[in-house]
Amino acid sequence: MPTLATCAGLILLASNLSNDENTYLSTLPVTVRRNAFGRQLGSYEKRGKVLDYDDFPMVFIRAPYIESTDKAVDTIAISKDHIVGVKYKSQIALSFHPELTNDLRLHKYFLSI
């Protein structure tokens, strides 16, 4: 089933959490670090490349990042030298919150798959 997961959704889909003994849905073959950029004060916004979209707005709130991926997983976004967005089959998982911006390109892309 197509899934667009943001922030905590990424944690729910991850097959492994490096700093938590729990796993949840485990449908995404990645290892995720929870609260990787720090607590609330570590939250930040930036613009960067996501998929083929240049200058895409990314809002990170107590964000996780992806430490490693299975070879079948495509990296679609990087921030501060860490993977913050991936695509695997019909799943897109992000460390950031595109829904908090006015940019609908990523949502439109998701609907197209």
Image (cartoon, rainbow, N blue to C red):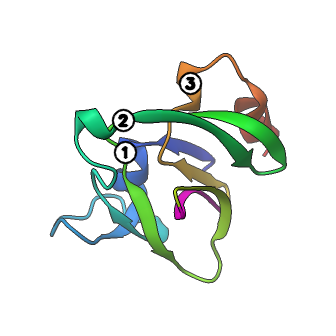
84 inside magenta stretch: yes
- Marks 1 and 2, how far apart at CA: 7 Å
**Mark 1 lies on residue:** 63
Tell me the amino acid under the disc marked 1: Ala
Whole-percent x, y for residue 30 in the image:
46, 71
Determine the secondary structure under disc 1: loop
Whole-percent x, y for residue 29 in the image:
48, 73
Determine the secondary structure under disc 2: loop
Q: From the viewer's side, name the closer residue of 13 and 31.
A: 31
Q: Earlier in the sequence, mark 3 or mark 2?
A: 2
Tell me the amino acid under the disc marked 3: Glu
Q: Is residue 98 left or right of residue 40?
A: right
Tell me the amino acid under the disc marked 2: Ser
Query: Residue at 58% across / 36% down in the picture?
Result: 46
Range of residues picked out in magenta? 81-88
Foreground mark, 3 or 2, reads 2
9 inside magenta stretch: no
Determine the secondary structure under disc 3: helix
Compared to residue 71, the image places residue 85 above or below, namely above
Compared to residue 31, the image places residue 100 above or below, namely above
Crowding at mark 3 (Cα within 10 Å: few <14, some 14-19, many 20+): few
**Mark 3 lies on residue:** 99
Do callouts 1 and 2 mark residues in contact (Cβ within 8 Å)?
Answer: yes
Q: Is residue 47 visible?
A: yes
Foreground mark, 3 or 1, reads 1
> Residue 43's mark?
2
Q: Is residue 98 left or right of residue 59?
A: right
